[in-house]
Amino acid sequence: MTNLLHHFTSTTAGLSVTWTNGAETLFPWFWLRDHGEDAISLDQTTQQRKIDTFAIDPAIRAQRVILSPDQRYLELDWPEHTQSLISIARLADCAGLIEAPLRSLWQAGSLPDPLPQIDYAEIAAGDVGVRDWLQLIQRWGFALIHNTRASEDGTRQLAEHIAPAQHTIFGSYWKLAAELREHADTAYSTQYLAPHTDATYYHDAPGLQLFNCLEFEGSGGESVLVDGFAIARTLQQQSPEHYAVLSQVEVPGQYLDNGVNLQTERPVLRHDRKGRLLQVSFNNYDRAPFLLPPADMAAFYAAYSAFNRHVLDQRNWLKIPLRPGMALILDNWRCLHGRMGYTGKRVFYGCYHNRADYDSRLRTLTNP
């Protein structure tokens, strides 16, 4: 990380850091004292803050700042003969200089051949295979798994390589087939399902969704995937006013069943504090009634319809005929999924994974 640092200068307001790319970042003195990474400031085992933030003098200023001998840290001398350390890596990360993980947005025709996929044996072999699997999901928003065991137990074993399944109203694991009528959901049918994201009625919508094909006898029933982030980028380029509406209007979702009334709301396009797209949340089946002033309501319907036109544009579709021995995992915060209508028998077994668990597993395997 030291190759990112060009030089630094002490000012009244804080430490001004100039990076090798020419960018400059001002780190306030209070912030630097609050974010020390030395043993007095930060528990080295738990990485939890030890310094009392609320006891820091608001007017504090470092008396001296030097680069550590290994050039990985800045050493800051404070009044009352105290010293703290902060890493160049942390400064660069907070300044937004660390490159985001590679994410390849796609339409059906731009995907690689073969599709993003991995053999179950690689996953079962250990953490390297699991890391490669999760990085495929991170880059493409989905991954196929070949040579899976076409059984409920095999599905659970596959899922547990990431984390325990997320428990929802459908249970920790669920079987999906037209013959089952356990829940009031159109997924339990043979009819066509338009691409959508799941659980728009949950405050914490699942991060991943796993489908393992147990049985298939018939025709049709292809799984459909759409890259919601790619659609969002296209919408932003073509109709920035629609993009803005879908980023601002909170759309309610609901799920109603015997003894169940789940409701929440969020924008179709949810962003993080830096303005980066974080989540696509789009499910017209589960959209609950809501009313805006007439002009705002008209603007919403126009933007929502524009997004839906991209969703239904089959140039954006990837159709996957899952068969026993194949599983599909997708990022439910990025990819919309649907299903073509079918005849015959189609039985899937699957689960959800919490977003936090997925992110945690990916981070620990990528940066051990």
Image: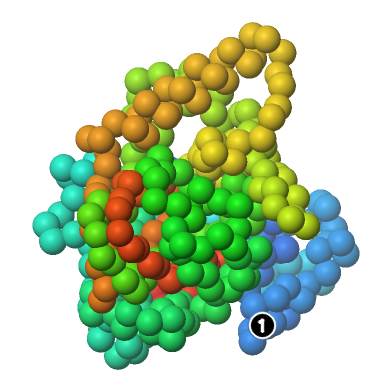
Q: What residue is shown with label 1? A: 46
Vertical comparison of 70 with 280: above or below: below
Disc 1 residue crowd, few under 14, some 14–19, many 20+, Cα 10 Å: few
Q: Is residue 134 visible?
A: no
* In the image: residue 4, left or right of residue 50: left
Q: Quadrant of the C terminus?
A: bottom left
Q: Is residue 286 visible?
A: yes
Residue at position x 66%, y 48% from top?
255
Colour setting:
rainbow
Q: Quadrant of the N terminus?
A: bottom left
Residue at position x 61%, y 29% from top?
248
* In the image: residue 322, left or right of residue 187: left
Furthest residue toward right: 55
Q: Nearer the viewer, residue 358 or 285?
A: 285
Horizontal and vertical percent position of residue 199: 58, 52
Horizontal and vertical percent position of residue 227: 34, 45
Horizontal and vertical percent position of residue 238: 35, 20
Residue at position x 37%, y 43% from top?
192
Vertical comparison of 51 with 274: above or below: below
Furthest residue toward left: 113
